[in-house]
Amino acid sequence: MKVSYFPGCTLRTKAKDLDFYARKCAEILGVELCEIKDWQCCGGVFVSAKDEVASKLSSVRALAAARDEEQPLVTVCSACHNVIKQTNSAMQNDPDFAAKANLYMSQDSNASAPYNGETEVYHYLELLRDVVGFDKIKEAVKNPLTGKKIAAYYGCMLLRPGKVMNFDDPENPTIIEDFIRALGAEPVVYPERNECCGAYVVLEDADSAKKKSSKVADSAANHGAEMIVTACPLCKYNLEKNTSVVPVVYFTELLAIALGVKEDTDAE
Amino acid sequence: MLNKTERQKEQILRMSGVNPLKCMRCGKCSGTCPSYDEMEYHPHQFVYMVETGDIETLRNSDSIYKCLSCFACVDRCPRGVEPAKIVEAVRLTVIREKGANHLTANEIPALLDDETPQQLLMSAMRKYSK
Amino acid sequence: MQRIGVFVCHCGTNIAGTIDVKAVAEALKNEPGVVFSTDYQYMCSQAGQDIIKNAIAEHKLTGIVVCSCSPRMHENTFRKTAAAAGLNSYMVEIANIREQCSWVHKEMPVGTEKAIILGKAAVAKVNLNAPLTPGESPVTKRALVIGGGIAGIQTALDIADAGFPVDIVETKPTIGGKMAQLDKTFPTLDCAACILTPKMVEVAQHENIRIFSYSEVSEIKGFVGNFDVTIKRRARYVKEDLCTGCGACTEKCPQKKVPNEFNLGMDNRRAIYIPFAQAVPKVATIDADYCTMLKTGKCGVCSKVCTAGAIDYQAKDEFVEEKYGAIVAATGFNPISMDKFDEYAYSQSKDVITSLEFERLTNAAGPTAGKLLRPSDGEHPHTIVFVQCVGSRCAACAEKGKEYCSKICCMYTAKHAMLTRDKYPDTDVYVFYIDVRTPGKAFDEFYRRAVEEYGVHYIKGMVGKVSPEGNKLKVQASDLIAGKQLHIDADLVVLAAAIEPDKSARPLATMLTASMDTNDFFTEAHPKLRPVESPTAGVFLSGTCQGPKDIPETVSQAGAAASKVIGLLAKDKLTGNPCVAHSDENMCNGCSTCGNVCPYGAITYEDKEFRMPDRTTKMRRIAVVNEAVCQGCGCCTVACMSGAMDLKGFMNKQIMAEVDAICK
Amino acid sequence: MQEIKREDLIAKAAQLLADGTVDRVIGWKKGEFDYDVTPAVFTSKEELENEFVWNDFCGANFSKYLRKEAEKTESKAAVFLKPCDTYSFNQLLTEHKFDREKVYAVGVPCNGMLDDSKIKAAANGISSVSEENGKVAVETLYDGKITLERNEMLAERCVNCKSKKHVAYDELLGEDGEVLDSARFDEVAKIEAMSADERFAFWQNELSRCIRCNACRNICPACTCEKCVFDNPDSGVENKAIADSFEEKMFHIIRAFHVVGRCTDCGECSRVCPQNIPLHLLNRKFIKDINGFYGDYQAGAEAGSRAPIVDFTKEDLEPGEAVERGGENA
Amino acid sequence: MQVNGEFKPLIVAFCCNWCSYAGADLAGNNRLNYPAEVKIIRVPCSCRVNPMFILRAFQRGADGVILCGCHPGDCHYTSGNYYTRRRMALLFSMLDYLGIEKERTRVEWVSAAEGAKFAATMNDFVEKVTALGENKRLEDLRCKK
């Protein structure tokens, strides 16, 4: 299966691992990630104001590109996913916004047909769950992570707003836990897993971010987690910067270890 | 003619798409908010104060920079009010004013470390400056 | 030619303020057929009615037109007036010059002109009216009550006491409903079982009441006074007439791991069970989903221990057909699912429970024998947080919960908080509320006692999130009065879940052709004046199937529904609506189109011999309307190409005469 | 030219009479002119051989005759039905208009019938019409023999034939055909595409020719009322002559509306109209709308089917949408 | 009809007894104004309205005809308005086909609780019909004053 792929800014720089292993694992699982040509940064965060148009255009371009290829659009980074899915929803449900965005887009040198929200947007995890299937992943696992107690950290961006993301139950998600189980490890369920890490406020109020990150990491540790997995570079940064109780890894790395693509440096 | 407060209110409501009259003042947003203690004015107050036109107070408060946009209040509100969107709209009315950027490019290098992801810079710029 | 009298009402200034009533009376004098025309202050008053009666006698009127308020208001009044003066009731027409004229137009000339036209239309119609006599249909003197909770029980008892036979159909193995699961009742704190179970016994022993438990209504046909109902009696694999309710089988059954729905799954029962000690009928039931014998054919322990020989593994669903004159819906409520409110961690912690579960936890017959213990570890909770309005008062756009107030939660939460503090003074009890709504006799006093005498902490604010950490539930909430965010380490969290109509109500409403609102509560015939009747004749509403209610309200509505049923069953015959369809057999060609559109199946076809002009005879298929079944919608009249089918009281030519008068 | 021969029909009819299956046969016989074929009842082989006609002018749909014919005696009558006639046959059965037991239906394949008005337009002073090598040969008083292309002389309803398949019969002569994809709604769509003013002008012009002869109603297999509303003084719409242009419109709207969901599109109304008003375009508008609004429905395709006008779904479109859609269809 | 040089349309409104007629009453109770050109005829159900009545109204001088019934699904007779919906969809489409202005006919669902909707509907309908002017295409000259 071929899908359009939007890596995002951080995956090219600080979060290369998140990207690298996503591609490697996709190959093994029979999914071809076709990187969108000339993609532009999503902006890192969705600005909810209805009159913010220009800041959402990079997402619309990516969506339109995927539409032109008749492929769903896949992202790995939680933030890109959140921005692109919310933008897509606005294109579908806010005709005023869609009209303005299409007007901007029509000025592009290689403008394609007006975009009206036709593309389906998947997070890589959704791809694993809904397209590949966790059962199939379980079969593909070469190095099961047996005995490992791993805490899933969703943060806020994968789940909310729930009606738009439509990713999982925002109050009691299970997708990453199921993913962890498929890799042979034991998921640790803890109540802070869907709370915000402090996000971009770290530049504004480092203490606030520290407080939030600590709460998350402590909660995971208290529930016996040996490791936290996340899909978001910013979550990883905040958790690692502010806490040291539990190591934090990207979910794609974990997948790569289980599939035998990556050496488990922690093993033994 | 609308006076300044009324204009501001109307703009905030239009940008955010929020109808504060739907609020039943249950306070679940503030019961939910992870940044409650960092804020001078809390999510339910944002909704109420915009409704009553007490907007300047909000614009002058640091509270507008404390919201994480984590959308927990949006998801849990039983009335579909979406307080986070109103916080964002109030903040935008401030930073869209000339010279009112809350974070400028010059301030950034001092805030960085080796691990800072690009995403953080992008989103902080998006949230705090125009 | 008719002799028509016209009576123009002033309705004080309601009509006369905008319409020149004298001019209307004067203008209508010249209409064809009109022999008398007058006006009066209040036509509906005794004096006004006397004017009409006198005029009928004096001018030998054959028809009257009253220009007044809406016919929905006083058509009946004036029909009775006419009848009292010896004129057929259906020779009366109303011109609505109040709601549809004087109240919606401001200028006197405009209003007056329109009133005259409306009057002319009514005169034109009366000119073509014919006296009508309502048909009669017999009344089956038996009532059906669907639902065996307190609402159904009370309705059934009241009807039965009046001397009419009643059947109760209950889906569960026992009657008793939600009230049987409650511990105490507010605001008097009577024990629910103490006041309910005697009534259940009374039902069981009443000579006029039959209970079809473990049964459901599968088909309803017919109409008021003459319903034909099919009741499906689900196989319970125990012969009701033989079972003595000794309970030996329920003790010996080896299948012990069946979630006990009576205790909301907080403990287990056997595959053969009697829901609770005071069940009525006190008969065991085999749960086919769990019974090893029924599933695999191996076991048979219950049959061996049953000395009465009541076990019957071969039992099949049975269908009972019965006729009823009236049907009462009493299908009750359930708490809504907490799936969309998992920020309260209901699915994540056993110690987050609903209020109904709390009732079972404090009930002496419950899973903990009445001791308030945490479901997770059986420990005594010291800090309890109650959350009100969970799923009630939600906006539609939030796409979760219900828009309405569930009405009973404020009071039962006060009750729970008070009883907890009373029994366990070492507990801290918090109640998070948006508003405390206590309209009701001794209700607010009750709530204040919880605060003032029992020291329950009422906090205006809402819980945002409940996080299970260790053996605690971390409750994060707002305190809007103090302007603080609170963090409470609770041992037990109790959610006041919104209530919703039972799922069986919607298919039942379809069978009854009774209407429902968007929340699936039954609609009443009139929200104020006919609150216990459904708009469908012969169908009545009892209890929470009509809207959220507490027990005293339910019981009073149940009694009111019963009195309506008794009023209906007391009649030997029902006079129908004479404005029914009628087919002119000389014009009907038997094409069957009318029967296709009749919502009531009131039209049948038969072959009839017609005498031809040449003295031969000819058989022809024609439509025949059952006047007792026809409700008078008139759908068939339009389906009929030839115009053979017409509607009495709203005949083609009458309506066309109105059109002509209006367009003249 | 018809594939099935006159002789075959006569032989079949004679056999049915001879073996007592029926005691009369409804068929066609010659009228005043060759193109003026009229329905007739035959009771003997001799009558059949002398008068029975089967040619390109046997357009008449006999279904409606069955209502009266089946009532006459206890014995059976045979009837010849072309494919399009069988739809009317079924529709009449759906409406209980005759006793199926009293009819023996013989299906006959049809190659399309000719429109005498088209021939008359092409030839003056016709003395005879015959077939010659698949063409139409017309002897005229003034111009001698004229040869016309058969396809060009076909009746409109045959040009747009909806089905060569018999949907009801006791016995079929020859081969059965298929339901066809016809272009019968093209003309309706063309009118829909006009502006409202053009449509009004078009119909004003067409309907103003109506002389209220009632031929369309009387021939219509769906018009089987004991008493037509237009003949009934109590109906409120009775009228027997056109006194105002309103009445032209009302008569034709009501006539078409009364056969909504029942009209099989047999085209008899237009065939018999002496003023050549395209009445089938009113019926077809309803059929086209029904197909578009409620899904394809062919009246008479199946006896006992429920017409969309006496049926509903909860999701039906609103009348306001119907009017908009009607325009968009254009 | 011309009143003082101004065109006042004549509107016939057929209202079902259970919902729309009550809705019209409620508009009255709440004193919600609408033009006096609207004259209501009470029928038990919208499905009682025969296309002949509508044509009759136009013949006799109406400029617009509106049918009001219970919302689909809420018919007092359970299904009457569903038939109305089909009949009128087909009839209105036919009128449109004949070139009769489609704004002259309308079906609206008005519940007993929708007094405001009734008044708003009538205001809107009268406005639309007024804009069209007199009914010429379905007039009967004999009925002209």
Image: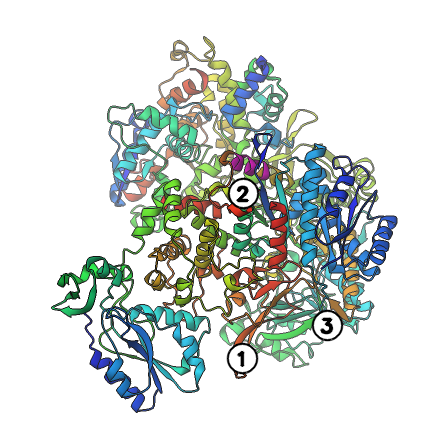
Q: Where is residue C132 shown, x and y percent of the image?
A: 71, 64
* Residue under the image location 20 percent in, 71 percent down: D2
Q: Where is residue C150 shown, x and y percent of the image?
A: 74, 59
Q: Secondary structure at mark 1?
A: loop
Look at label 3 and name its amino acid. Thr
Instruction: Classify residue C655 by image quadrant.
Output: bottom right
Q: Residue furthest left?
A: D133
Both marks 1 and 2 on one chain: no
What's the distance in space between the residues labelled 1 and 2, CA to CA?
45 Å
Q: Where is residue D69 shown, x and y percent of the image?
A: 41, 79
D46 horizontally vs E121: left or right: left
Residue holding disc 3: C140
Q: Residue furthest bottom?
A: D19
Instruction: Classify residue D87 by image quadrant.
Output: bottom left
Nearer mark to the viewer, of 1 and 2: 1
Q: Is residue D248 magenta?
A: no
B117 horizontally vs B79: left or right: left
Q: Identify the magenta region.
A: E122-130
Nearer mark to the viewer, of 2 and 3: 2
> Which scheme is used to colour this image of the protein?
rainbow
Viewer-side residue, D175 vs C390: D175
Residue holding disc 1: C612
Circle on res. D24: none
Q: Secondary structure at mark 3?
A: loop
What's the distance in space between the residues labelled 2 and 3, CA to CA?
48 Å
